[in-house]
Amino acid sequence: MIPAILFPAFDPVAFAIGPFVVRWYALAYIAGIVIGWQVARRLVGLVPVAGTREQVDDFVTWATLGVILGGRIGYVLFYRPDIILNAPWEIAYLWHGGMSFHGGAAGVIVALAWFCHRQRIPFLLFSDRITSVVPIGLGLGRIANFINGELWGRTTDVPWGMIFPHAGPEPRHPSQLYQAAMEGLILLVVLQVIVRTPRLRARPGFTAGAFLTGYGMARIIGEFFRQPDPQLGFLFAGATMGQLLSIPMVLFGIWLMWRSKPVAEAPAA
């Protein structure tokens, strides 16, 4: 017998008031946005100044739309293109679940570019401060995945292998927790050290590049323990969709850090 831990009987619903139901996954999104917003407000005014606290306040709405629209569209394009052919109206069915980080990241990048253009603030400096807090939401989101008993890992014989209720009788890696640690806690600590180091903060694009590189590497590693999406399985050379989408992120992030040059101080908005 392989030792295994039974998955705790978590209720995916945090609380309900009559017909109004709030799930842990929704709370993770809300908490990630609110906490990240408050931290970004403190970071944006550091030298070189990237903007004002009020501009961070305004960007929250843009970021939320970018995450939701980009995340959902990215999921459909990358993981469920059959929806476009068979039931395109289901693209709007957010309550059915299905969000892609890579799509959400693309949505936020578009939102950042458009917002900075309209506000006439430095795109890379503002992006540095925003991306430095993104791992807060990523870590909380992975914990919500674990509570929901979804996105489980591959079968394993490690002592902490866990039997998930909808994944069969075999013990599996609790890969959601691995990813919460790598994409959330560890990446957050690294980025906060970078963004609070004056000589690194003075290089526009360095923190954003570190985020892209760090997340991409964490996702590639995490996918070695996570069960691939059943409708896709393993793709090119045994890689998963998450790994293939993360490779360009790593390369672009490295390039962004390499090309970043120090500035004395960006003009205040």
Image (spheres, rainbow, N blue to C red):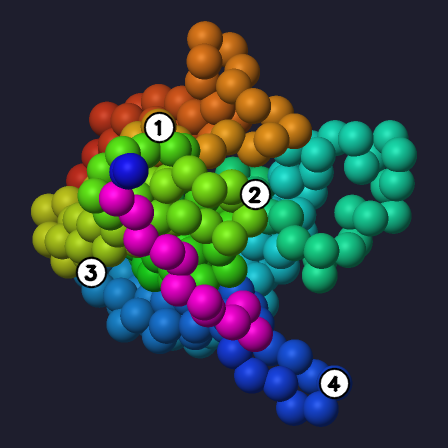
Can residue 43 be seen here?
A: yes
Which residue is label 2 attached to? 100
Secondary structure character of the magenta stretch overall: loop
Distance, label 2 to label 3, CA atoms, is 34 Å
Say which mark, if any, is on residue 19: 4
Dot in front, 2 or 4 = 4
Closer to the chain start, of discs 1 and 3, is 3
Which residue is label 3 attached to? 47
**Residue 266 at what x, y percent from top left?**
28, 54
Between residues 63 and 241, which one lies in front from this camera angle? Answer: 241
Label 2, secondary structure: give it. loop
Which residue is label 1 attached to? 224
Specify the segment rendered in magenta.
3-13
**Quadrant of the rendered structure where residue 171 is?**
top left
**Is 145 rendered above or below residue 61?**
above
Q: Are marks 2 and 4 in contact (CB under 8 Å)?
A: no
